[in-house]
Amino acid sequence: MQIGIFTVGDVTPDPTTGRAPSEHERIKATVAIAEKAEEVGLDVFATGEHHNPPFISSNPTATLAYVGARTERLLLSTATTLITTTDPVLIAEDYAKVQHLTDGRVDLTLGRGNTGPVYPWFGKDIRRGLELAVENYALLHRLWREDVVDWQGRFRTPLQGYTATPRPLDGVPPFVWHGSIRSPEIAEQAAYYGDGFFHNHIFWPPSHTQQMVELYRRRWEHYGHGPADTAIVGLGGQFFVRKNSQDAVREFRPYFDEAPVYGHGPSLEDFTAQTPLVVGSPQQLLERTLASIEYAGHYQRQLFLVDHAGLPLKTVLEQLDLLGEILPEMRRGFAEGRPAHVPDAPTHAARVAAAGGPAATTAPLVADTATGRRAEDAVGVSA
Amino acid sequence: MTRLVVVSAGLSVPSSTRLLADRLAAATVEALEDAEVTHVELRALAHQLTDRLLTGFAGPELEEAIEDVRRADGLVVVTPVFSASYSGLFKTFFDVLEPGTLDGVPVLVAATAGTARHSLVLDHALRPLFSYLRAVVVPTGVFAATDDFGDTGGAAGALDGRIHRAAGELAALVGKVSSRDAAGAPGGAASTRRSVSDELAEPTPFEELLRRVSEG
């Protein structure tokens, strides 16, 4: 079981003080939070991707590479990488590079998530969001598995004799999760490729998560990847804890009431009853998290959102300390009753082993004739 | 058994909007002979509707109301007139329905107001809204002003006549158009859109999703 955190990178004024961190503070805080995640024994740090204020989460690969350099064993991921508005060629190169730099400690979660205005900034149309996700991933999948790709599609210029560089580390591409809150088509896509499925889980009722995960598991089996309970499932989660649950409720309420995602809406009490949000004691967090198994089955990855809504860095780090304290017990709980045939979350080492050992990753010597195969060829062309 | 759902957006208790809704429901049931009526009273769902706008998912009671409407064979919708149109509460309920929910569903539109001068709200506001939602709006809409309820003479008789004519039209359409299967999924010629729940029950195979991209 992999347990970790995911961040959206919102810059939100602290409702109790009115003060918003600067972009610089928030970016540095993100790194501090990731380092703390490793310190308390978590397995995964994942960052989202947004390209508009009030977020600081553009260029997630730079963040992941930097965090990778400052940590030893933390897995680096995304929640999510925008497969709709980001060129799959760029994704193939960027994440392969981070994979090399971090010795395979990277995977990624693909998502569509973007608001209408963001699409045209990147030359795309939100009304084609689903189709973009389908076509772009089909290309990304090939770019990581075929050294030379000839390709033609609807949403980008054709590729002729194209090689994405660097080639994936050890010949094994970063593992891909497909993230979706409410599009069954994305669960279908994950099942088709035999990739992981990540359900954000946190802002919607568990009954909805259950339907999506069940669909993914059913179709995983349909496409011949194995029994439904061997599918690779990740879930989001969200909490605010204090030793005394009443303290947690009192302290978190102003943040909840003003939060960008659910503020001014349902009461804290309604929202904790209707969604997986836990505001209470670490024991309550433990119980609620393990209860997810009842409707999602035994799953592979649990990520928590802890650093949003204007919570100060100091508080977020305290939250991670509290999570760290119950981590051994949470791991025990996840292991309990877990059938032996349910796979662990994928790691680079395990996937390389499954592929029969590392493959050579030297890119073949091919290039277009305009710029030349080698420097001397280019000279020859211009002369 | 025909599933008739009555959506009313009156704000006071008791409400003349609810009163009109009840009379329309009774007349439709009478015309259909074998119908089951479910009332969706929006006043009780006002908080959850606002929450739904902000969070993207519906609370349990609202979810149940949406599910009732999704499974309905026919609808009676009644709103009070606010600022020359349907009330915001009424509109919000229809705003949060998933696209395709009302495809081909027969709908009887009705409204209440203080004076008869608002009666065009049926044709200026309600009919376009339900046309947009691809519902089949019955020819006769029913508007009731305060006078209609108070008058013991010809006017009351006229309201009663309109109620029965509209109810008869709805019953005829429900009988003709309704093609929703037992699972509540819209089907038949009137509806080709697929909802999230259709997709969850029976997903479009990925090869088909890929093919659609290449065919544009």
Image (tube, grey):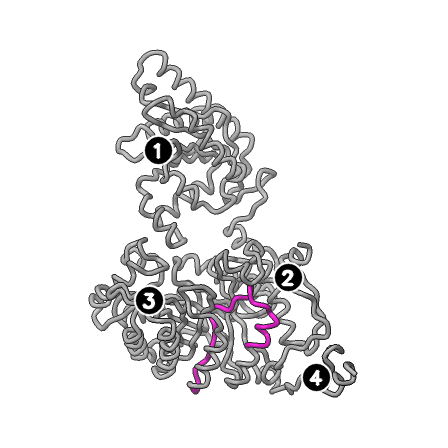
Query: CA separation, marks 2 and 1?
Result: 46 Å
User: Chain ID for label 2?
Assistant: A
> Are dots 1 and 3 on a single chain?
no
Picture quadrant where residue B76 is located:
top left
State the residue position of label 1: B82
Residue A155's label in the rendered image is 2
Give the crowd class for mark 2: few <14, some 14-19, many >=20 residues within 10 Å.
Answer: some
Distance between the Cα atoms at labels 1 and 3? 45 Å
Q: Dot 4: within a 10 Å radius of its alpha carbon, few (fewer than 14), some, or many (20 or more) residues?
A: few
Assign a secondary structure to mark 1: strand
User: Could you classify mark 3 by the number of other residues whose Cα lies within 10 Å: few (under 14), some (14-19), or many (20 or more)?
Assistant: some
Q: Position of residue A223 (x, y in %)?
A: 61, 65
Instruction: Please state which amino acid type lies under the numbered disc 3.
Output: Arg
Q: Which sits in the foreground, B214 or A343?
A: B214
Q: The disc labelled 2 sits on which kind of residue?
A: Phe
Numbered-mark total: 4
The reply to whether dot 2 and dot 1 touch (C-beta < 8 Å) is no
Q: Give the number of the mark in front: 2 or 3.
A: 2
Relative horizontal placement of residue A158, taking residue B97 as reference (left or right): right
- The CA distance from mark 1 to mark 4 is 71 Å
Please, what secondary structure does the residue beneath circle 4 have? loop
Q: Chain under label 1? A: B
Location of the N terminus of chain A (image quadrant): bottom left
Above or below, B34 against B159 in this view is: below
For mark 4, what is the residue?
A364
Mark closest to the chain's N terminus, 2 or 3: 2
